């Protein structure tokens, strides 16, 4: 894995958290994006080599709402950049890691993404991200 691509933070009020993180990081949010397949809205910030992704639900009782009800707002996942997501998924499956979904899906920020199940990673939700293949 190449680097920590971003850290995902679960928030209940995206707009309020965007202004908070703009002040905190002293940089504007460069992208907001709804990911309708996941029922979430995201906001991205650049911090050097890595990014911060704020994630909030777009529907009631969604994934983030459940997470926040259980654990409060806070760090939701860590995303690692990989070159070839398919081969990385194969490698990790051979090592016995479990995935939330077996195939990569189209995620936010123009990436292909796939989540490892936190059961197999010490309770940390890990996301693999790769650039979409061109063509
Ligand atoms: Zn993410």
Image: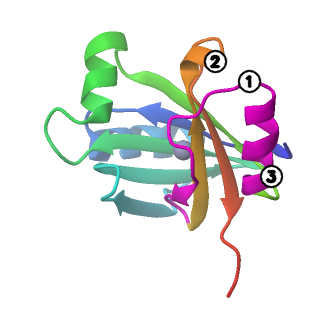
The residue identified by callout 2 is: 120
**What are the residue bounds of the magenta stretch?**
85-109
Q: Please give left or right for residue 31 compared with residue 26 in the image.
A: left
Q: SS at mark 2?
A: helix
* Among numbered discs 3 and 2, the one appearing first in the sequence: 3
The N terminus, quarter of image: top right
Q: Check residue 68 for magenta coloring.
A: no
Q: Which numbered disc covers residue 41?
A: none
Q: Is residue 3 above or below residue 65?
A: below
Q: Nearer the viewer, residue 86 or 21?
A: 86
Of labels 2 and 1, the one closer to you = 1
Q: SS at mark 3?
A: helix
Image location (x, y in percent) of residue 29: 49, 56
Q: Who's the residue at 69% across and 26% down the image?
A: 97
* Among numbered discs 2 and 1, the one appearing first in the sequence: 1
Residue 26 at least partly seen: no
Image location (x, y in percent) of residue 81: 75, 49
Q: Is residue 117 above or below residue 3?
A: above
Residue 47 at least partly seen: yes
Q: Who's the residue at 63% across and 18% down the image?
A: 120
Please identify the residue farthest to the right as the structure is shown: 2
Q: Please give left or right for residue 63 compared with residue 119 in the image.
A: left
Q: Nearer the viewer, residue 108 or 21?
A: 108
Please identify the residue farthest to the bottom as the structure is shown: 135
């Amino acid at each position: 894995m190449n680097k920590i691509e971003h850290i995902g933070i679960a928030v209940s009020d995206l707009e309020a958290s965007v202004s908070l993180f703009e002040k905190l990081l002293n940089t504007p949010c460069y992208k907001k994006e709804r990911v309708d397949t996941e029922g979430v809205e995201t906001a991205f910030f650049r911090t050097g080599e890595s990014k911060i992704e704020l994630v909030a639900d777009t529907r009631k009782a969604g994934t983030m709402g459940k997470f926040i009800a259980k654990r409060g707002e806070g760090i939701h996942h860590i995303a690692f950049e990989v070159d070839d997501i398919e081969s990385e998924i194969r490698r990790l499956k051979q090592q016995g890691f479990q995935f939330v979904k077996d195939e990569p899906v189209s995620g936010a920020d123009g990436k292909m993404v796939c989540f490892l199940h936190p059961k197999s990673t010490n309770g940390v939700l890990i996301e693999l991200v790769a650039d979409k293949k061109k063509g």
